[in-house]
Amino acid sequence: MNTITIILAEDHTIVREGLGILLGLEKDFAVVAEAANGREAVALVLEHRPHVVVMDIAMPLLNGLEATRQILRTAPETKILMLSAHSDDAYVKQALAYGATGFLVKQTASNLLSKAIREVHRGNAYFSPAVLKRLSRCEDKAKAKGDLPPKKGARELSQREMEVLQLIAEGKANKETAWELDISIKTVEKHRQSLMEKLDIHDTAGLTRHAIETGIIESSVQGTTVET
């Protein structure tokens, strides 16, 4: 029997530990590492090269969407299965745009999680039933209207700009952002200016709204510090 190696990326310890215990019951699964934030997930994937990452979206320091983009850039053979408490269309579409192979909501039955991991490992897309229904409806409507995919969006931002945007949306001041990313305050200011120019948004509140609307962070993640 071939073993499927897995990394769990989830910032809530009790959820992460519970998932580890659950997946440990499957004879063909091996959880090789656990990450509490997106940045740690990226580093662990480079170290372990797992078959599948079970990835939460809303995590500190680096969200699951940007972590997915960075992982697939350096380890394209790894499959990403998103596991989120939210299944809003914006989150699902962003996850797929960034390269996720599947998307499950956390209310999903445990047997579907195991099935989803095996399917994405084979290279097949897998979604929670409710998510799949909505995706099908959206696809049908798009075909009927002849809609084209948008040409502009958050994916135009660089890796560093995405990291800065998340930290801004989490309420971090320039000094805190510089410390988190190990860059100078002047460099943070340049990235802020670039973000505003690229997104045509000219205040911190607007950047935060954009981050929430595009699934970069969840509204509950936003910090209380606001710097303008």
Image: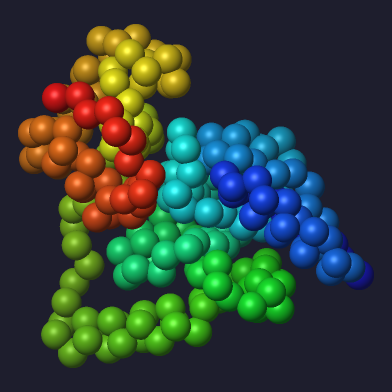
Residue 115 screen position, x and y as percent: 69, 77
The image shows residue 196, relative to residue 66, as above or below, that is: above
Residue 128 in view (yes/no): yes
Residue 70 screen position, x and y as percent: 49, 41
Residue 58 screen position, x and y as percent: 45, 49
Q: Residue at x 44, y 83 (%)?
A: 130
Q: Quadrant of the C terminus?
A: top left
Q: Residue at x 23, y 41 (%)?
A: 208
Q: How is the image coloured?
A: rainbow
Q: How many marks?
A: 0
Q: Residue at x 30, y 11 (%)?
A: 185
In the image, 224: left or right of 2?
left
The image shows residue 146, relative to residue 77, as above or below, that is: below
Between 135 and 70, which is closer to the camera in this rendering?
135
Residue 88 screen position, x and y as percent: 34, 68
Q: Determine which quarter of the picture holds residue 18.
A: bottom right
Between 22 and 39, which is closer to the camera in this rendering?
22
Q: Quadrant of the N terminus?
A: bottom right
Q: Determine which quarter of the picture holds residue 147.
A: bottom left
Residue 198 in view (yes/no): no
In the image, 47: left or right of 39?
right
Q: Residue at x 36, y 49 (%)?
A: 220
